[in-house]
Image: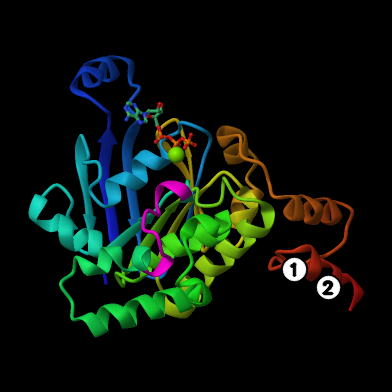
Amino acid sequence: MGPFIRFRDVSFWYSREKEEKSQSSGSHVLSEINLDIHKGEFLALAGPNGCGKSTLVRLINGLLLPSMGSVSVDGLDTDKRDNLPAIRRKVGMVFQNPDTQLFASVVEEDVSFGVENLCLPRNEIRQRVDWALEQVGMEEYRNYPPHRLSGGQKQKVAIAGVLAMRPDCIVLDEPTSMLDPGSKQEVLTAVRDLNSRHNITIIYVTHDMSETIFSSRIIAMARGKTIYQGNPEQFFADKESLRATGLAVPPIKQLINSLREQGIRLPANINSLEELVDFICL
Ligand SMILES: Nc1ncnc2c1ncn2[C@@H]1O[C@H](COP(=O)(O)OP(=O)(O)OP(=O)(O)O)[C@@H](O)[C@H]1O
Ligand SMILES: [Mg+2]
């Protein structure tokens, strides 16, 4: 089976004016991106401010179109207008600010908004909304007004709205960067569950490297290019890529690295302080 999402020689700049400028100065927003994303992956996309992460993910569902090269989703090219409805059913997007994504007066109305447009029978809509709220643990809040929810709960409702469309893939662009640590954890756990229980492909944009520990692959970007693709463990040990992106190794992995430097042998799959304590004490 071919890749679910495919970028081929994709370059992007925001306007024709910029095109002339960028072709002389070489400062495309994205330059020659080649990327294959397979069904079921949990892909973390990381890199410094302004390196092009949001631009790259907006190319996936045709919110932006490549200036050069091509992007396809499940074999459908994003630059054919007729393909866009199908592409947008396959790939849902969740953004950074939970307050700009919810607009109905009650949670369940918000979650059903997208599905209502699919012209499905009423009971199918109801089932999908129930299912989606349950998957993110928000079924008890179905009759709440969104403004009474915490930031993390609002993000989970936004995710449920996308989920009700039964997408193959969800793209989340820094979904936790405005949340407190407890809410961050709630959202990340909900997203990990969707990937592991339902095999939904996840593309997770973040600055916070501790959120990338559980990903199946990290794509690290700098200045409009992908400069690293591989597993998180190798990335955290790759000093050159870390320097080029300015990204920091998560504290737990720093601790493990320094314990290893002191000769303590530790397995690769320790991802939290609790797991480290258990390994050392048991
Ligand atoms: N609508 C736009 N018009 C013109 N330039 C833009 C537009 N949006 C982004 N840019 C520029 O494109 C570059 C890449 O921006 P992008 O938002 O994709 O980066 P990012 O990696 O998501 O950054 P951040 O970490 O701050 O979210 C930046 O130089 C930005 O200023
Ligand atoms: Mg961004």
Q: Is residue 262 magenta?
A: no
Front-lying residue, 259 or 194: 194
Q: Are marks 1 and 2 in contact (CB under 8 Å)?
A: yes
Answer with mark 1 or mark 2, whichever residue precedes in sequence.
1
Q: SS class of the residue under badge 1?
A: loop
The percent position of residue 66, horizontal first and vertical second, equals 22, 39
| Mark 1: few/some/many CA within 10 Å (<14, 14-19, 20+) | few
Residue in view at x 24 percent, y 64 percent: 89
Task: Check the picture and name the quadrant holding the C terminus.
Answer: bottom right
Front-lying residue, 198 or 40: 198
The reply to whether residue 191 is visible in this rendering is yes
- Going by the numbered disc 1, the residue's amino acid type is Pro
| Magenta portion: prevailing SS class | loop
Front-lying residue, 67 or 34: 67
Q: SS class of the residue under badge 2?
A: helix
Residue in view at x 49 percent, y 77 percent: 139
Which span of residues is magenta-colored? 99-108
Residue assigned mark 2: 279
The reply to whether residue 2 is visible in this rendering is no
Q: Which mark is residue 267?
A: 1
The percent position of residue 25, horizontal first and vertical second, equals 33, 15
Q: Which mark is residue 222?
A: none
Mark nearer the viewer, 1 or 2 = 2
Residue in view at x 50 percent, y 66 percent: 191
Q: Is residue 122 left or right of residue 178?
A: left
Q: Quadrant of residue 4?
A: bottom left
